[in-house]
Image: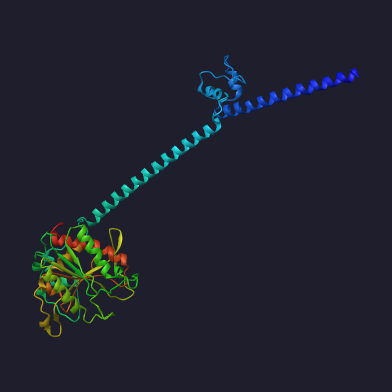
Amino acid sequence: MKKRGTTHKFIISFLSFYIIISLSVNVINEDIFHAFVTGSVLGYSSANAIDDNKGKENSVLGIVADSNPMFAYVDEYQTDKPDNSDPMLTVIENTEKESSKSEKETTAKKEEKKNTNKEEETTEKTQNVANVFSIPKITGNTYSVKKLSDFDFLLNNFYTVASSTEVYKSDLDPNVLLNKDMTMKQDNSKPQILIYHTHSQETFIDSKMGKQDMSIVGVGTYLTEILTEQYNYNVIHLTDSFDIVNGVLDRHKAYDQSLAKVKQVLEEYPSIELMIDLHRDGVDESMHLVTEVNGKPTAQIMFFNGLSRLASVGEIDYLYNPNREDNLALSLQMKMKAEAYYPGLTRKNYLHAYEYNLSLLPKAMLIEVGAQTNTFQEELNAMEPLAVLLHMTLSGEGEKE
């Protein structure tokens, strides 16, 4: 019995000791875990801290809380403050803040770069616009009045004459036509230019059915914008459908209808000096009237004149045109400028038998731009050099051809 009692005491003592040791180890393990995690996150292990010990022991592991702020941070965590935050979360929060700050800085830099690129693009576009609408250098051919005084040379190289009419040498005297003053008063306080379309339904290879802004009217809109915005002319653009009668395409009376409207506008605005009836030509489907200007595919242009003269009977009295000489002068001057500044842009000037309402003003033009086989964009591109040529003629700017 004595031996058994001794055994019982030994077992009880051993169990008590085991429990005490286990509890101590758990406490130590918990603190070791916190210290180890904190030290690792901050770049220090518990071993480093103990090696650096100079007598200032941590409450559990003896980790030094010396002047190094990292250790001071660890020591502070080991205290018993009830509302002390987890250092791991603090570090993560700081990391997230830094990451957020970095992302914001990156976004700001990207935005700054984007804005810079936009500014550069705007500057480039502005420069391109300036280049397109500034007076170009002569890159084509120029012709002396003496050379052009050769009637056959002038007629064969610069004119196409319809079989229905006849042209006389006196009609095309370059000494007269090239010396006429075709400049305009540079006063835009009142309307100066009228653009209209006797054949408003003329369209192009890629025009959308029923969309007027992709017809010849849309081309006239762009010409109006250029003359207004780039050269400060006061322009009226008529978008009336003169070739539509009772909802049906009918060109038989189109010139009569446009005549009535144009007369009305000219009476209302006597300040108008230039009128342009803008068309596109009709050609064989295999023909594509295109050239390149400023690196762009550009519809070719033709200046059209009516002589009010039939080859069979001579002058058409009821279509008498007192402004025929001025009309011919304007189109020849435009043609010579095109030859000098935009070689290949224009076709030969066309001479036809009738009057086409050109008698209304000395500076009256009928201009054919491309044809039905051109794209709408090619038509628009043609308005840029056309506007330059018009401005040069109306302002007198540019080199002498």
Residue 7 sits in quarter: top right
For the residue pair 138 and 273, the one nearer the viewer reads as 273
Q: Is residue 330 rendered to the left or right of residue 29? A: left
Q: Position of residue 202 (x, y in %)?
A: 28, 74
Count numbered badges in the picture: 0
Q: Residue at x 59, y 29 (%)?
A: 37
Can you tell which quarter of the image residue 282 is in? bottom left
94 lies left or right of 123: right
Please state which of residues 309 and 375 is positioned toward the viewer in this rendering: 375
57, above or below 87, in the image: above
Q: Quadrant of residue 374?
A: bottom left
Question: Farthest top residue?
Answer: 55
Determine if residue 301 is in view. Answer: yes
Q: Is residue 157 visible?
A: no
Query: Which one is in front, 256 or 172?
Result: 256
Q: Name the residue located 40 percent from the left edge and 44 percent from the top edge.
A: 110
Expressed as whole percent of the image width and height from the top left, the position of residue 363 reads: 13, 68
Left or right, 98 with reference to 144: right
Q: Position of residue 357 (x, y in %)?
A: 15, 75
Residue found farthest to the bottom: 313
Where does the N terminus fall, quadrant-wise? top right
- Of the 4 image quadrants, the one containing the C terminus is bottom left
Relative to 384, say whether 114 is above or below: above
- The residue at the point 24 percent across, 75 percent down is 241
Q: Position of residue 133 (x, y in %)?
A: 22, 57
Image colouring: rainbow
Which residue is located at x 20 percent, y 60 percent? 228
Outermost residue toward the right in this view: 1
Residue 16, above or below 300: above
